[in-house]
Image: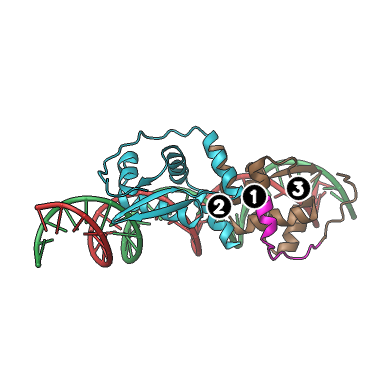
Chain colours: A brown, B cyan, C green, D red
Amino acid sequence: MDIFLETVSALNDETRMKLLAFLDTHGSLCVCDMQESFGMIQSRLSRHLKILKDGGFLRVDRCGTWAYYSIRSPLDRFRSEALAEIRCLNLDLPPLKKLSQNEGCTL
Amino acid sequence: MDIFLETVSALNDETRMKLLAFLDTHGSLCVCDMQESFGMIQSRLSRHLKILKDGGFLRVDRCGTWAYYSIRSPLDRFRSEALAEIRCLNLDLPPLKKLSQNEGCTL
DNA sequence: ATAATATATCAAGATTTATTGATTTAATAT
DNA sequence: ATATTAAATCAATAAATCTTGATATATTAT
């Protein structure tokens, strides 16, 4: 029960739906670029990303101090359907602002 | 967005997951029987059932003062997957206590 | 008409979750 | 070593949700 509730409650937030849609569109992004794109403070983003990761939606690749988040693949059926629903919502997403000049990492 | 969030937040509660599992097992039930089975006060159940109905999971058939709730059919893909997940959880459900002597309604 | 039953809704308090700003940890650059 | 940058975590407050008890509405029974 708890595991599924954790998955559901990860979905249960407008900010997190937009983050999923954003990562779905742009692939792998570091926290600072999402922070810049969404105009949110870092602690807020970090918390939401952790909830999405714990809910089984995201993977993290660490590279020095950078953390690159992306949508886990493959997703199970429930999470896939959730993502499909989110795609259909045509959420109003901010433009991607890439600030990080992190050439050292190849993911 | 709001419609899908309403669907997700309907799922986002342990009591409501159990109600879905209970109705999935027993079919169509009136509020008073669920109230008796779960040992919950009526206003609490009524509220949760409304949230599940507004979230698109349940239908209601009214019959005099009785309201019979059951799982909507057909469910769309997302809600079907959610129900499938809930079935797999093997939730600890109370035994069904049927009190209502409502023979007048044939649903 | 009155009483009893089934359900829905409302208001208040309790609980949970989200946001912010500050602090911490760790890696990189000077 | 010091400063800077990226990210995570913590504590306090704000906001949303859940629970309870009371009330309202509507139907059925006497």
Q: Tell which circle, 3 or 1, labels the residue nearer the N-terminal end.
A: 3
> Can the viewer see residue A1 in this picture?
no
> Can the viewer see residue B31 in this picture?
yes
The image shows residue A49 at horizontal and vertical percentages of: 67, 50
Identify the subunit bearing mark 1.
A
Q: Same chain for marks 2 and 3?
A: no
Mark 2, secondary structure of its residue: helix
Mark 3, secondary structure of its residue: strand
The image shows residue C21 at horizontal and vertical percentages of: 61, 61
For image coordinates 66% across by 41% down, the residue present is A77
Q: Nearer the viewer, residue B71 or B85?
A: B71
Distance from Cα at disc 1 to Cα at disc 2? 9 Å
Distance from Cα at disc 3 to Cα at disc 1? 16 Å
Q: Residues within 10 Å of mark 2 (few under 14, many from 20)?
A: many
Numbered range of the magenta stretch = A82-97
Distance from Cα at disc 2 to Cα at disc 3? 22 Å
Q: Residues within 10 Å of mark 3 (few under 14, many from 20)?
A: many
> Which kind of residue does numbered mark 1 sit on?
Ala
Q: Which residue matches tag 1? A: A82
> Which kind of residue does numbered mark 2 sit on?
Val
Q: Same chain for marks 3 and 1?
A: yes
> Which kind of residue does numbered mark 3 sit on?
Ser
Q: Which residue matches tag 2? A: B8
Report if residue B6 lies within the magenta region. no
Q: Which residue matches tag 3? A: A70
Mark 1, secondary structure of its residue: helix
